Image (cartoon, grey):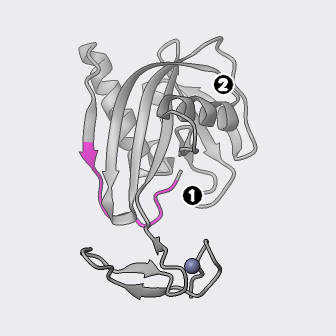
Amino acid sequence: MSFCTTCGHITIEQMPLGDHRIRQVCPNCGTIHYINPKVICGALALWENKVLLCRRAIEPRYGLWTLPAGYMELNETMEQGAARETREEAEAEVHIEQLYCMYNIPRIGQIYVLFKSDIIDGQFGAGEETIESRLFEEHEIPWNELAFPSVERTLRHYFEDRRNNCYPLHLETLGSRLDQTG
Ligand code: ZN
């Protein structure tokens, strides 16, 4: 059961006139409650050729390593979102260098946007949602302890691109993991 965020009435499932999907519709005030994909912004944050990863202090995937990333907020740009999440989760200030990876995850209605970034002063720490953060060289990456497929994809792209010294935008669609979140 869900409620109308406009008037508080119980909503019904209905296909609005001219629409092609079932929506939550309020029979009292007529508001159609659309649910659309969410954007998750994050950073591939680098310092002296090493990658910053955070060990998650929250579910899902508690204790596994991830890139600093999270839901984009209203009134911010994607770049600001990526920098904010890096500040919150890893206590690091980054200079956003370029748009690097975009992942559609249609099964769960998410879009990941990751920016290749430089840590400004080499300083980092552990925010509220992080047990610890660390810089990793390629051979140190805990491949079996990464939190999400998007993290592994991004790291594999980075180390391969680094060998070619060329960092094109990677736009991909990832599979059906139900628990992919920021
Ligand atoms: Zn209503």
Instruction: Please give the name of the residue rendered at 63% of the width and 60% of the height, measured from the top-left corner.
Output: 59
The residue identified by callout 2 is 92
Circles 1 and 2: CB atoms closer than 8 Å: no
Q: Is residue 166 or residue 11 the one in the foreground? A: 11
At label 1, the amino acid type is: Arg
- Of mark 1 and mark 2, the one earlier in the sequence is 1
Choose top left, top right, bottom left or bottom right for residue 86: top right
Indicate the secondary structure of the residue bearing disc 2. Answer: loop
Relative to residue 23, is residue 67 drawn left or right? right
On the image, the x and y values in percent for residue 64 come to 57, 50
Indicate the secondary structure of the residue bearing disc 1. Answer: loop
Relative to residue 4, is residue 88 drawn left or right? right
Q: Quadrant of ligand 1?
A: bottom right
Mark number, residue 5: none
Q: Is residue 73 or residue 90 the one in the foreground? A: 73
Instruction: Please give the name of the residue rendered at 48% of the width and 23% of the height, measured from the top-left corner.
Output: 137
**How many C-alpha atoms fall within 10 Å of the one at disc 2: few (<14), some, or many (≥20)?**
many
At label 2, the amino acid type is: Ala
Looking at the image, residue 36 lies above or below residue 4: above
**How many C-alpha atoms fall within 10 Å of the one at disc 1: few (<14), some, or many (≥20)?**
some
Q: Tell me: is circle 2 under 8 Å from ligand 1.
A: no
On the image, the x and y values in percent for residue 176 come to 33, 64
The residue identified by callout 1 is 61
State which region is magenta: 172-181
Farthest front residue?
29
Relative to residue 14, is residue 118 drawn left or right? right
Image quadrant for the N terminus? Answer: bottom right
- Predominant SS of the magenta segment: loop
Q: Is residue 33 or residue 171 the one in the foreground? A: 33
Choose top left, top right, bottom left or bottom right for residue 65: top right
Instruction: Please give the name of the residue rendered at 75% of the width and 44% of the height, measured from the top-left corner.
Output: 128
